[in-house]
Image: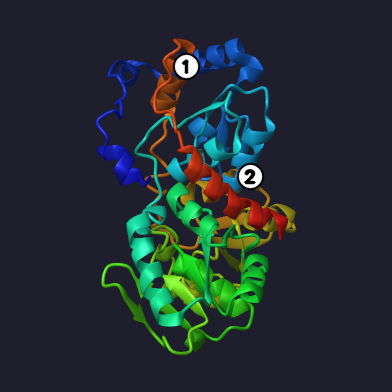
Amino acid sequence: MSLMDVLNEEAVSLIPEKYRTWSTEEIEKRIREIKKEFGSRLFIPGHHYQKDEVIQFADCTGDSLQLAQAAADNKEAEHIVFCGVHFMAETADMLTGDHQYVYLPDMRAGCSMADMANIKQTERAWERLTALYGDTIIPLTYVNSTAAIKAFVGRNGGASVTSSNAKEIVKWALQQKKRILFLPDQHLGRNTAFDLGIPLDHMAVWNPISETLEGPAEQATILLWKGHCSVHEKFTEKNIAHIRKTKPDMKIIVHPECTHEVVQLADLAGSTKYIIEQISAAEPGTKWAVGTEMNLVNRLISSNPDKEIVSLNPYMCPCLTMNRIDLPHLLWSLEAIAEGKGVNRIIVEKEEAKQAVLALNRMLSI
């Protein structure tokens, strides 16, 4: 189910107005009380891109799959309040036990990239592409995708990927079939394949709106879904040129969800974890321009006072959907649990979850 499907359901609850009238101090005090009351029965994972006001209450911080796995490993937690976005909470629900309930404090917290590939579009694309290429395609999906897309990939013999392990999974996939359909982020797919030596003229882009292949269809090895991250696409070649001109001694590090041109011009590219580790381990006094989400950039700045760190794009704003969860929504979610009537519970249907976990497990076994 996509975020838009969720928001269209009549059952979606809206936050009571009273939480908007409380002061920050009152909200923080009440959150601490509930966390103390529930102890190990409550677990709050917080994604790297969340606001500091929310991250301060996280029991664990990390990327999406890491947090879902942490929730699954925490068998004592009965209630998992996921401070991230919808597809992350879905993954947590799929990996946790039947005795564990997963909640998303604000159902508007989604991912525009994940919503660029819905299951109907994907099934139509698969029908068209297999008619064109026969049984030569294996699907891969970035973990930034809905449970329905992961399930599609799972039942068609494919695997999920993260930005950390994409190269290994793509190498594996090309040992299984001649071609890959890579969903939903074209940039991660393109950058990963290029790093493995696949030329750009062996990549085509599937446009789910026009239902056509853009590019060299005949010789295509990599079929990229026409999706992208609305944040990482905002980093440009002009941003890099400005840094090179004004701060030539500054290293540029970007996420592989950025465009191919930006990744090629940067000094380093890697996952969120990679970015954090590179900057944290860097020598004092080093200078960094970072091409990723602004909340994380600001956190890197505050946690590395011995280095000069800026956003690669000085006009970058935090991800709008990642920033939906705030203190009032977090408290509302926790108080609803305390009252025995949890709101915004995330439930993935069992058969869909079973097929989606196939894709996740294939990834983990490689």
Q: Is residue 103 above or below residue 360?
A: above
Q: Which residue in the structure is indicated by mark 1?
A: 337
- Asked if residue 360 lies left or right of residue 125, the reply is right
Q: Quadrant of residue 172?
A: bottom right
Which residue is at a point 44% across and 10% down the rendered structure image? 339
Residue 61 rendering spot, x and y as whole percentages: 61, 39
Residue 335 rendering spot, x and y as whole percentages: 44, 15
> Is residue 279 visible to us here?
yes
> Is residue 301 visible to us here?
no
Which residue is at a point 58% across and 56% down the rendered structure image? 309
Residue 66 marker: 2
Indicate the quadrant containing the C terminus: top left, top right, bottom left or bottom right: bottom right
**How would you rate the neighbour count of disc 2 (Cα within 10 Å): few for under 14, some for 14-19, many for 20 or more?**
some
Residue 352 marker: none
Residue 217 rendering spot, x and y as whole percentages: 41, 86
Residue 106 rendering spot, x and y as whole percentages: 38, 32
Q: Give amino acid for label 2.
A: Gln
Q: Give amino acid for label 1.
A: Ile
The mark that comes first in sequence, 1 or 2, is 2
Indicate the quadrant containing the N terminus: top left, top right, bottom left or bottom right: top left
Instruction: Give 217 or 33, whichever is nearer the viewer.
Output: 217
